[in-house]
Amino acid sequence: MAGAHRSAPPSPAEGEGFGRGALEAVALSPGADLDGFRAAARRLAGRGIPPERVLWSIGEASGLFGAPAPAPSSEAPLSLPRGVGEMVARVVPHRDPERYALLYDLIWRILQGERRLLEISSDPLVHRLERMRKAIARDLHKMHAFLRFRRVAGDGPERFVAWFEPDHHILGAAAPFFVDRFRGLDWTILTPEGSARWDRETLAFGPPGRREDAPAQDGFESGWRDYYESTFNPARTNLAAMRAEMPKKYWRNMPETAAIPGLVRQAAARTGAMIEREPQMPVKRNPARAVAAMADQAPDSLEALNAIIRRLEPLVPGATQAVLGEGPVGAAIAFVGEQPGDQEDRQGRPFIGPAGQLLSRAMAEAGIDRGEAYLTNAVKHFKFEERGKRRIHQKPTAGEVSHYRWWLDRELDFVAPKLVVALGATAVLALTGKAIPITRARGPAQFEKPYAGFITVHPSYLLRLPDEAKAEAYAAFVSDLRRVHALGQSLAA
Ligand code: URA
């Protein structure tokens, strides 16, 4: 792509104020000229110029980047009810050439005394503006969801470029989302009307790009495709809804959509196979690895990570939902269990069934506030075998534990505890990659992670012990948790 970037969104090339008979001509910059419109509206309203005397026009594209910034308006801000400023900011990016005239009409009528005009949704002007506002919201959503960065080939510093064709002039409004999401990357978004560049410090807007300026392929193509394929649920294929949500025009810029026609063709057969499948038969695909391959584009918050985990298909069909971790980000102590049980699966919360209740009791006795700790599991879905009406817990295999390891690691990265407690052998395997007997490793441990470790038994082990052994084992468990509490306090101090 060519051209220098400025450090502010495109702003006015304005020739306001020269009379044409009784008309006031206002020329704004192409695109979303919010500053230009605000300044002009203030001046016009300040001088009592009614909408029918204003001729709004949009300047030549050549003025977009070379034009001097407008002189600061000396007019006082207009006194408008709440919501008007937001409506203006939302509608200005609309492609409709009448948008400025409509918005000035709105402002004028409000200033003339219709203070509650925006609340009258049956008013034709309000109705039209509202539809425009919704169109912009939809366009922003599509850009946030469907834009794909691709790595620029070469030996220089790592850079990413994306090509996108929004329906409206939303580049300026959409860019902050990507700054937030990909703050650590050097990226450029090219559109037919302008470009946005983030160099890890500054967001700058520049001239249009061309589709050919964005790399067509990069190493993440197959990662996105694998990820999409692995999370695609054939039983839920609804082409009409898919097209409404993800219009075909965006497909060509999204590597994963290459898989859609094939997946749709196979959907009926795969659904049949899912119904036939033995409940224990593991699904072979590995979304964790696929996403790990796209490390740079991986989720950048616990919330974003959880949104993906929620959509993961269970490795073994049957679970009601993925059970996410619970507790505050920044908790000093995190507890990692094995996998959700029957109750957890039904209610979508970790450690609320019998083992969880025992854990809560022991934590309280050891002085640990459960609400201040973070509780999660190595495996995010309940694996079970049906016996009559009962769902009997099945231990996850090493392969299943390793499938979820990437997610657990990212989760703990975001929570950033000082101390992680592995409850039982599955948690130890998930945190270390090694099968270590608890009896040998019980106590403080080193997981080669940025937090201290501690290994103890899983509370469900205590529940399975014969009655005569329970009290002693429980006391030892509480004593472990007392050490955990003390360690957590000293590490957090
Ligand atoms: N056992 C676990 O390991 N985790 C839960 O959430 C419940 C029981």
Image: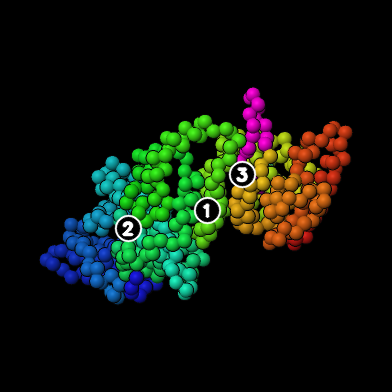
Amino acid tagged 1: Ala
Of 371 and 248, the residue lying toward us = 248
Q: Is residue 253 left or right of residue 288?
A: left
Which structural element holds mark 3? loop
Give the CA distance from mark 3 to mark 1: 17 Å
Identify the residue position indicated by label 3 in the image: 380
Rendered image quadrant of residue 236: top left
Which structural element holds mark 1? helix
Asked whether residue 354 appears in the rendered view, the answer is yes
**Is residue 161 shown in magenta?**
no
Alpha-carbon neighbours of circle 3 within 10 Å: few (<14), some, or many (≥20)?
Answer: many
Identify the residue position indicated by label 1 in the image: 290
Of badges 2 and 1, nearer the viewer stands 1
Q: Quadrant of the C terminus?
A: bottom right
The residue shown at (49%, 66%) is 185
Of 76 and 261, the residue lying toward us = 261
Identify the residue position indicated by label 2 in the image: 165
Q: Is residue 386 left or right of residue 95?
A: right
Q: Earlier in the sequence, mark 3 or mark 2?
A: 2
Q: Earlier in the sequence, mark 2 or mark 1?
A: 2
Which structural element holds mark 2? loop
- Residue 281 on image: x %, y %: 58, 37
Amino acid tagged 2: Glu
**Is residue 381 shown in magenta?**
yes
Amino acid tagged 3: Lys
Extreme residue in the left direction:
21
Asked whether residue 69 appears in the rendered view, the answer is no
State whether residue 371 is above or below residue 213.
Answer: above
